[in-house]
Amino acid sequence: MRFKLPIDGFVLALLSTVALASVLPAQGRGAEVMGQAANVAIAFLFFLYGLRLAPRAALQGLAQWRLHLAVIAATFVVFPLLGLATGLLPESVLPPGLYAGILFLCVLPSTVQSSIAFTSIAGGNVAAAICSASASNLLGILLTPALVALLMHGAGAGISLGVLGDIAMQLFLPFALGQLLRPRLGAWAERHRWLLGRMDRLSILMVVYVAFSEGVVSGIWHRLDAAQLGVLLVICLALLGAVLGVTVLMARLLGLGRVDEIVLVFCGSKKSLASGLPMASVIFAGSQVGLIVLPLMLFHQVQLMVCAWLARRYAEGSRETVALPAE
């Protein structure tokens, strides 16, 4: 059996962008221009998300409502509670900036592509995975900002009225426009999926460059050392392990079959890097963003590697090669 576990190529691109921002950060007028371009890129990203995401997929399979509610509960209830629990760690172990990043990570929606891919590889209910992952992303457009407002005041990252306006202009409206134009442009988007996917990634890399440039200029990275990054890695592994355990337990308590358990495990344990990075740039102040998205970037690679291994265990003899998704 061939089974590839490389570092995700998109993660390498993100790390390269962080390195570039550390050496050559955008400053002055250049930073203003890049910031405006990043805002346009974020709006474009969410327009594409709206264009691609079929509401019908989130409404199909309603007969499996217990499974879909369990996925939503894992994503928007279990994860945030675990994130809040990390606040019990002393500040010397988990500084406030990284704690805010952990909380933000925990309130994000699930991924779509990787959740469906791993469910398929593991031999799960792919149709149900499409429904659950789509519903998670549709709800996340509303629930993630609401949960940030509810949970993150204590982490110094509450939402002001001005931020709410930015969320509406850069996230909600482009997404809604994409949904409205989906009947006309959806087929075109499918035909050009590869090209639009590359544009997605370039837009996200631009957002990351701007965010980390602001962090470098403000001196925020002098507060981090290798030991804190090691602790952050352990926290990400612990979060993922806890959620995987909880989702398996939920599946057993609900009496779900193996194919539906796989859906709950893989859809309920993911967090979307593609949605999280642009959302963070809209919700948080510029100098905060780099530190806040650091846990998400690390968790992204951790979830891909662990879930790829887990999909192999579920597959039990499948000869498919795992290709790690970019999301």
Image (spheres, rainbow, N blue to C red):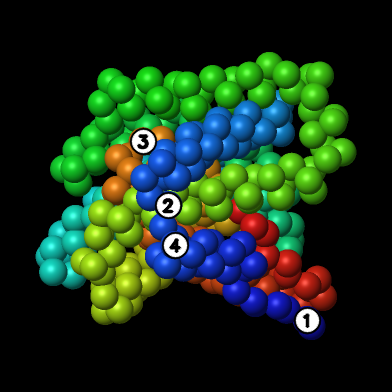
Q: Locate residue 11, reporting x and y percent.
A: 56, 65
- Nearer to us of marks 4 and 1 is 4
- Looking at marks 4 and 1 on the same chain, the residue that comes earlier in the sequence is marked by 1
Q: Are marks 1 and 3 in contact (CB under 8 Å)?
A: no
SS of the residue under disc 4: loop
Q: Which residue in the structure is indicated by mark 1?
A: 2
Left or right, 155 with reference to 302: left
- Nearer to us of marks 2 and 1 is 2
Crowding at mark 2 (Cα within 10 Å: few <14, some 14-19, many 20+):
many
- Is 149 rendered above or below residue 295? above
Crowding at mark 3 (Cα within 10 Å: few <14, some 14-19, many 20+):
many
Name the amino acid type tagged 3. Ile
Q: Which residue in the structure is indicated by mark 2?
A: 26
Give whichever of 126, 260 is nearer the camera: 126
Q: Which residue in the structure is indicated by mark 4?
A: 24
Q: Locate residue 211, reporting x and y percent.
A: 40, 50
Q: Which residue in the structure is indicated by mark 3?
A: 283
Residue 272 visible somewhere in the drawing: no
Q: Residue furthest front?
A: 29
SS of the residue under disc 3: helix
Q: Residue furthest top?
A: 180
Left or right, 88 with reference to 239: left
Q: CA distance from mark 4 to mark 1?
A: 40 Å
Crowding at mark 4 (Cα within 10 Å: few <14, some 14-19, many 20+):
few
Q: CA distance from mark 3 to mark 2?
A: 20 Å
Q: Locate residue 62, reporting x and y percent.
A: 64, 30
- Looking at marks 4 and 3 on the same chain, the residue that comes earlier in the sequence is marked by 4
- Nearer to us of marks 1 and 3 is 3
Q: Residue at x 35, y 23 (%)?
A: 164
Name the amino acid type tagged 2. Ala
